[in-house]
Image (cartoon, rainbow, N blue to C red):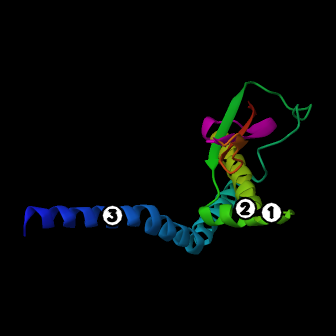
Amino acid sequence: MTSGEIGELIGLVAIAVSVFLFIAFPTLAFIYSMIFARFHQGKYQKQLLTREKLVMQQLGKDNLSTLSTPVPERKITQTGLVMSNITVSPSWWQLFLGSIRSIFGGNIVSFDKVLAYGRNEVMQRLREQAIGDGWEEVVNVRVETSMVMNKVRGGKQNKMGTLEFLAYGTGIR
C-alpha cells in the first residue's frame, strides 16, 4: 500500500467512526432505552417496595409524619434535622413519549412514573436515615423538588432535565 492509499483508508475509517458516533450510537442507545428502561425502572420500584415493607414490619408504623408537633403526651429528649435526597431523570424513551404527549396536552404518564418513584424513594431514604441516626420519629416532614441540569436553548428553557427530590424533617427521640 502506498502512503496515499493509507491516508485514504484512514479517512474512510474516520468517516465510518464519525457516522457510528453521531448516527448509529444515539439510535442504538434510544432503542436500548425503549426496550430496557421499563425493566430497569421496574426492578428499582420492586426493591423500593421491599425496603418499605421491611421498615414497616420493623417499626410497626410509619416513622414519618407531616404534623408540625408530636403527640402532646410524648416526652422529647432530643431533636435534630434529618435530610435525604435523590436525583432522577426520565429515560430517552420516556422523554420521547412525553414530548409527543405534550404536543396534544393531557396527563403525561411516563413523567408521572418518574415523579412517583422519586418521591417514594426520597421518603424511604429519609425513613432509613432516621433509623440509622437513632431517631424514633420524624415530624414536620417536607419534600421539595427542583430541576437540576436545566438547560436554556435558544432563549427557551428545557423542561426535561434531571429532578432532585429533597426530603427533610425534625428527628425526635
Residue type at numbered disc 3: Ile
| Residue for point 61% across, 61% down | 91
- How far is the residue under mark 1 from the one under mark 3? 36 Å
Residue denoted by label 2: 99
- How far is the residue under mark 3 from the one under mark 2? 32 Å
User: At numbered mark 2, what does the secondary structure look like: helix, strand or loop?
Assistant: helix
| 132 to the left or right of 82 | left
Residue 138 included in the magenta stretch of the image:
yes
Residue denoted by label 1: 103
Residue type at numbered disc 2: Ser
Residue denoted by label 3: 15
How far across and down, in percent of the image, does residue 164 sit? 67, 43
Q: Which residues are magenta?
A: 131-152
41 versus 75 height, above or below: below
Q: Nearer the viewer, mark 1 or mark 3?
A: 3
| Residue for point 54% across, 72% down | 31
Q: Earlier in the sequence, mark 3 or mark 2?
A: 3
User: At numbered mark 3, what does the secondary structure look like: helix, strand or loop?
Assistant: helix
Few, some or many residues within 10 Å of mark 3 (<14, 14–19, 20+):
few
